[in-house]
């Protein structure tokens, strides 16, 4: 018998409003943490900040306790790709810090990540951050109704390869998101032969490319969470939760642009 394809969670317009509410909480708290990433700050500082901000907004963490994860935010420094556990080691000028954070509001999940420089970083590191973020937006741009899932990974890979000799981490990728943080389908960051399901309005995906300055091979520390590059190369990770709509992709975890209230 042919294996049955997993059902995808398709949201109604009303449910997308709930997804946007969760996404806005994620975006707002990311903005607060972004300002806190300076030399001398620690991962535990960011975790405490995220907990406080969640409480103030009446939201809960979808990271804390997830398969035993001990914090509300993943803080991954330099050669840590993803899933870093916050610790008391201060950030230093020249480091890069990935912040992966999510929230739950009224049962709906949001999830986003960004990699930030601490002070001044080398030119090649700065370019990697910029190129990885551009790869994220390339993948998001491919999220249009009627297209296939694999077009997201193809767009990410094409952008990354056009910018330099980066490693694309293949062991980890994006995912569906909605009433759970991780849902089908898995969203790969590279070309595949399998087309995957058609994208349709109401499908929400977390797109999250991860690239390195060296070999993309990784290993996991004994804490069963922290993922590092095998060769010690530094890595970047960017992510947004995005809804497919009839008009194209709608980024759920980005802040609204400032309104222009000036008279014309």
Image (cartoon, rainbow, N blue to C red):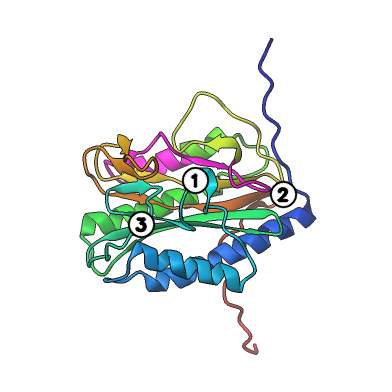
Q: CA distance from mark 2 to mark 3?
A: 29 Å
Residue 257 x/y as whole percent: 57, 72
Q: Residues within 10 Å of mark 1 (few under 14, many from 20)?
A: few
Q: Point out the residue furthest to the bottom here.
A: 263
Residue under label 2? 246
Label drawn at residue 130: 3
Instruction: Give the foreground label among 1 and 3.
Output: 1
Magenta stretch encompasses residue 42: no
Give the label, 2 or 1, closer to the camera: 1
| Residue 196 can be seen in this image | yes
Residue 107 lies in quadrant: bottom right
**Separation of residues labelled 2 and 1 (CA atoms):** 38 Å
Give the mark nearest the N terminus, 2 or 1: 1
Q: Is residue 225 above or below residue 241?
A: above
Disc 1 and disc 3: Cα gap in Å? 32 Å
Identify residue for label 1. 68
The residue sitting at 56% across, 41% down in the picture is 175
Left/right of residue 223 with respect to residue 72 in the rendered view: left
Q: Are marks 1 and 3 in contact (CB under 8 Å)?
A: no
Q: Residues within 10 Å of mark 2 (few under 14, many from 20)?
A: few
Q: Which of the pair 243/62 is nearer the observer?
A: 62
Callout 3: 10 Å neighbours few (<14), some, many (20+)? some
Q: x, y percentage for residue 6?
A: 67, 29
Q: Position of residue 190 (x, y in %)?
A: 44, 35
Question: How many numbered tags mark residues here?
Answer: 3
Instruction: Give the magenta range.
Output: 155-182
Q: Nearer the viewer, residue 95 or 163?
A: 95
Determine whether the residue tagged by mark 1 lies in a helix, strand or loop.
helix
Q: Is residue 24 above or below residue 206?
A: below
Asked if residue 82 lies left or right of residue 205, the reply is: left
In this rendering, position of residue 99 left or right of residue 149: left
């Amino acid at each position: 018998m042919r294996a049955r394809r997993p059902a995808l969670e398709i949201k109604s317009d009303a449910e997308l409003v709930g997804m946007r509410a969760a996404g806005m909480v994620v975006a707002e708290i990311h903005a607060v943490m972004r300002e806190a990433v300076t030399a001398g700050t620690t991962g535990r500082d960011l975790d405490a900040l995220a907990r406080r901000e969640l409480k103030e907004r009446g939201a809960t963490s979808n990271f804390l306790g997830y398969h035993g994860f001990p914090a509300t935010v993943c803080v991954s420094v330099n050669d840590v790709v993803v899933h870093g556990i916050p610790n008391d080691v201060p950030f230093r000028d020249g480091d890069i810090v990935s912040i992966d954070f999510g929230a739950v509001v009224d049962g709906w999940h949001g999830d986003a990540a960004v990699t930030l420089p601490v002070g001044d970083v080398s030119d090649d590191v700065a370019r990697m951050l910029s190129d990885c973020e551009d790869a994220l937006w390339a993948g998001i741009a491919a999220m249009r109704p009627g297209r296939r899932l694999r077009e997201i990974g193809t767009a990410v890979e094409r952008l990354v390869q056009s910018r330099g000799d980066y490693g694309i981490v293949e062991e980890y990728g994006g995912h569906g998101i909605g009433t759970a943080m991780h849902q089908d389908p898995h969203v790969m960051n590279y070309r595949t032969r399998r087309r995957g399901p058609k994208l349709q309005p109401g499908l929400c995906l977390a797109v999250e490319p991860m690239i390195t300055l060296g070999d993309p091979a990784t290993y996991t520390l004994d804490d069963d969470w922290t993922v590092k590059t095998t060769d010690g190369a530094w890595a970047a990770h960017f992510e947004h939760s995005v809804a497919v709509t009839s008009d194209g992709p709608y980024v759920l975890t980005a802040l609204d642009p400032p309104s222009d209230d000036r008279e014309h």
